[in-house]
Amino acid sequence: MTPLKSAWHHIRRSPFQSLIAVTVMTISFFSLSFFVIISHGMSSVLNFFETKPEVTIFLKDGLDRSTVEGLQKELSNYPKIREIKFISKDKALEIYKEQNKNNPLLTEMVTASILPASFEVSVSDPKILEQIAQNFSIKTSQVDEIIYQKDIINSLLIWTDFIRKTGIIIVSVTTAITILIITVIIGMKITNRKEEISISRLLGASNYYVKRPFLIEGIIYGLTGSFVGLLITFILSAFFAGRINLFFSPVVFISSDYRFYAILLLSSLSLGSLIGFTASWIGVKRNIKF
Amino acid sequence: MKVVFDHVNKSFGVINALKDINFTVEPGEFIFLVGSSGAGKSTILKLILNQIRPSSGEVVLDDHHLSKLEKNKIDKIRRQIGVIFQDYQLIPDKTVEENIALALDINNFTPSLISEKIEKVINQVNLNSRRHLFPSQLSGGELQRTALARALAIEPKIILADEPTGNLDAENSLNLLKLLKDINELLNTTIIMSTHNLDIIKSLDKRVISLNNGEIISDSQNIKPASEPKKHHTHLSKK
């Protein structure tokens, strides 16, 4: 009988214990993949804000062309600037009308003269934004107001960090519980098969020969549990992706990139088999002694 | 396979199960170990199988000193030994066929060779119609024949049979004995069989080692002159 067949034989002979092992592994990998997808979504949101024109500098009315050009030149001297966009009063009105096209009352009363001209500055390094915001806020004769999305980013960073840390804690706890349960289950299976092990030893079975089916059994639990856990996450993601992505629009919170899911699947299967192997190895080590 | 017991003693706590046991079994020899319960027959077989180790003295199998062997070497030695246990030692949730296959698999036979060997031994012990049954579905005689088939399948250098006829009727006992005798003669397999069935012993002209309270009280090889091959039977009859 091949080791794989022996392992399958063990699984069939105690199906409920095997079901428990697969279930805890499934729960563990469902929580892992759930937090990975949420964390990935939060990173997309954060990335969106970090790469948007984060600082909007509203200018005072009546500035002459050379002053505006001077400010633009000063901005362009900062490192890691991605784009500096000048929004004139007329352009600002155009944007305003576009944003409120469904509410004519708001657009009728507004003219270009009451809207300020502004610079929208995007950078590749968010740290530069802080410098720009600080330096331009003191130019009170030229700058009317600075809108800086630092608070939003900070808040997002805190949430992302919190979700990641929570995820790590929950996944670590469930993984530890999974290892413990599989270790106990393998131990019970070994106890149930003490007679078979003892007979095999008398027939000349090596240490490795006796232990191998139990180790393979652990790997089977790992592979099955991780696959099912991930499958549940994938189904739920596919089901809720439309609504969640609409909520976060224009950010794609639930990724549709198949490479992301392929990597997640491969990593989970590898990690699952490693956890299954480790758990059964501990079980075997504790219960089979020659 | 040659077996040497050299001043072997074995104690279990305060009980001395074997006392200064000395004998040699040459390759291809067929010997009986006889004695009442607790005489030390099973202890000798357990020592050969390395299930237990002597308290003192040496057990040597083909130049391998068992007490000095590493664990992985013990497995290799055991793979050359076919064992028929008194209580059969069959795995309950494996069929007759699977129990035999296990021994072959442990001995690293290929799947095709395993099928071939199973076919051969199952026919040899006449268990063809029972091959897919589990031990709980077999009679005592069938269980014993399954254990024998498992021992024969690996073509061992030595067969240890611990009271193999204990649960068999007279006819099955003689059949089993005939099979062991044939294997011994055809394949030159060493056979050590423990029994207290004198009819069995009388039916074959083989060497007999008699034990009592852990001591060898007679060895037909030592007391039997070459010209008087049946003398040990007389000795046994007296006992």
Image (cartoon, helix red, strand yellow):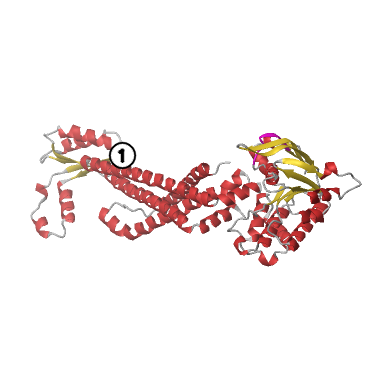
Using the rendered image of the protein, determine whether residue A125 is visible from the camera's viewpoint: yes
Residue situated in front as seen by the camera: A256 or A265: A265
Answer above or below: position of A91 versus B118.
above
Indicate whether A71 appears above or below A176.
above
Is B104 in the magenta?
no
* Quadrant of res A78: top left
Chain of residue at mark 1: A
- In the rendered structure, the answer to whether residue A152 lies left or right of residue A288 reads left
The picture places residue A284, in percent across and down from the top left corner, at: 52, 45
Q: Give the labeled residue for mark 1.
A: A124
Residue at image position (18%, 55%) is A98
Q: Outermost residue toward the bottom?
A: B129
Magenta includes B53?
Answer: yes
Check the image and name the residue furthest to the front: B238
In the displayed structure image, the side of residue A48 where residue A3 appears, left or right: right
Query: In x, y percent, where is residue A123?
Result: 28, 39
Q: Which is nearer the eye, A129 or B111?
A: B111
Residue A84 in sight from this viewpoint:
no
- Residue A167 pos. (x, y %): 33, 45
Question: What's drawn in magenta, residue-wise?
Answer: B52-59
Q: Which of A170 and B227 is in front in this view?
A: B227
At 44% across and 49% down in the image, what residue appears? A268
Quick one: quadrant of the N terminus of chain B? top right
- Residue A105 location (% of width, % of height): 9, 58
